[in-house]
Image (cartoon, grey):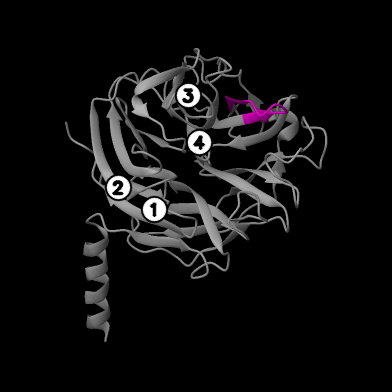
Amino acid sequence: MRLALLLSLLCVRSFAADGTDIIVFEAKQNLSHPSVRIPSLLRTQKGTLLAVAEGRDKPTDQAGNDLVISFSKDEGVTWSKPKVAYEQGADSCNNPCLLQEAKSGRVFLFYQTFPAGGHEFGGLPVGPADPKGNRSCFVTSDDDGVTWSKPTDVSAFLKPAEAITTASGPGIGIQLQTGPKAGRLVIPFNSQDAKKNFCNWVAYSDDAGATWQRGALVPQTDLLQLNEVQVAETSDGGLYLNSRRWKGTPYRKVSWSKDGGETWTAAQDDLKLPEPTCQGSLLRIDDHTLAFLNPAGKGRNNGTLRLSHDNGHTWDTAQLTFPGPFAYSSMALLKDGRLGVLYEPSGDTLVRFRVVELPRK
């Protein structure tokens, strides 16, 4: 019996390591929720993979969403049964964004909330003062995601006065490793005003997450609006921002910061990064390499992994990694140098994990 079990585990390990998908979240199966979307993936300093998503009560963006979590202790070969990391009754929790502070090991999980029955385009109040409006919050964990703190509402410090919604990520935040802002925690955000215009900015903390500030808006034109967003550290300790379009041409919108997100260059199209209006994931691989993954086909199809060796100015390597339906994703660098990818294959009932090799020139 033990031998059979051992052989079974070895087969799973070999099978899971060759690019085969593993189901992490499945609606009405390992989740009670009828819908699941919006992946966030973090590999902690202890080597735990944390996968978070929105467990939704209906197949809509604001449906009493809970934040659900699953763990892997073996680089994504096996995953725990999902559980609820945080829920707020009939309110909706959206846009999970994970981040770990290196010195303490504390994990932050940022999200936005909508009051029960409230919707992104449903006429919510403007600004941070009204408690019945959209809120920006986080919970923390000091045990690799097993338990979570009570929520901290940072809307008063972060939500712009003109904003109706203020959404983190979704995906991950980062901690700067080099340069004058080394140690700074950074969470990327988008905001929507009463006229349904969207913009990007980042929240940052220089005291290990005790307090947070909002950087300047990324300069943009009315026809070049930025939406769901990720950032990565550049080789000089700055930031590269890569954003989904809300308006404008069908390309990703990009910007750079030399002061840790306090100010930004004017947003511009990256004509090498096609954009079918979908979230994309971004990850720093090493001091000179950034990885970007998004659907690059017509519609949400053909997840394409690209590498840049000049801080996102050009993408010299591209690989079609996920042929067929592909939507939101989140990446983590594994111990052996490969990438773990948590992603939506299609629809709103599955979130899967796959280990992939980095593209070669």
User: Circle 2 — which element?
Assistant: strand
**Could you tell which of marks 4 and 3 lies nearer the N-terminus?**
4
In the image, taking residue 234 as reference, residue 167 lies left or right, namely right
Q: Residues within 10 Å of mark 3 (few under 14, many from 20)?
A: some
Q: Which residue type carries mark 3?
A: Ala
Q: Main secondary structure of the magenta part?
A: strand
Where disc 3 sits, the SS reads loop
Q: Which residue is mark 1?
A: 345
Crowd class of label 2 (few under 14; some 14 to 19; many from 20; radius 10 Å): many
Give the alpha-carbon distance from disc 4 to disc 3, as whole Å.
14 Å
Q: Which residue is mark 4?
A: 173
Depth check: 13 or 277 in front?
277
Judge whether residue 109 is colored magenta: no
Magenta-drawn segment = 191-202
In which quadrant of the rendered view does residue 177 lie?
top left
- Of labels 2 and 4, earlier in sequence is 4
> Which residue is the site of mark 2?
322
